[in-house]
Amino acid sequence: MRIEILAAAAFGAIMTAGGTASAQDGERYWVEKSQDGYVRMDRQTGEMSYCNQRDGRLVCRLAADDRRALQDEIARLQDEVAAIEERLASLENRPREEGLPSEDEFEKTMGYMERFFRRFMGIVKEFERDLGGEPDDGTSQKT
């Protein structure tokens, strides 16, 4: 019984002590005696740990559900990182002339420019007709 009291006191000291521990850290954990040791709950994350006394020390391990959830999240994040790295590698290895568009991109852009200038010149010709002048056939010296 005396060892259990000392263990609980030491456990409480460990939970509230530390070089950067604040008063709020002491309120972060909830500890309760169980049949075979202690149960510790992190009030911020909800993480549960089971603690037992071994060789005069308290040894804590994550609850099985928490461990499984953490391992699942780690696996998910590893898969996500692998997919991002694969995508980045494919983008970095893509053959492309520096700063120049592809042939398809160039042709598409030229098509837009051609449509723009044809439409613009049509508007200019309409203005000249509306003003009573003849459409410019390229022989006049107007600027």
Image: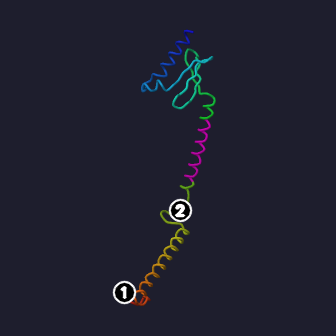
The answer to whether 85 is drawn above or below residue 60 in the figure is below
Magenta extent: 71-89
> What's the magenta bit mostly, secondary-structure-wise?
helix
| Quadrant, the C terminus | bottom left
Amino acid beneath label 1: Lys
Reading the image, the residue beneath label 1 is 142
Q: Residue at x 45, y 84 (%)?
A: 126
Q: Residue at x 59, y 38 (%)?
A: 73
Q: Residue at x 47, y 82 (%)?
A: 122
Q: Secondary structure at mark 1?
A: loop
Mark number displayed over residue 26 = none
Amino acid beneath label 2: Arg
14 and 94: which one is in front? 14
Label 1: few (<14), some or many (≥20) within 10 Å? few
Mark number displayed over residue 96 = 2
Q: Residue at x 47, y 25 (%)?
A: 27
Label 2: few (<14), some or many (≥20) within 10 Å? few
**Inter-mark Cα distance, 1 to 2:** 44 Å
Q: Nearer the viewer, mark 1 or mark 2?
A: 1
Q: Residue furthest top?
A: 2
User: Is residue 124 on the magenta stretch?
Assistant: no
Q: At which x and y percent is residue 136?
A: 42, 88
124 and 19: which one is in front? 124
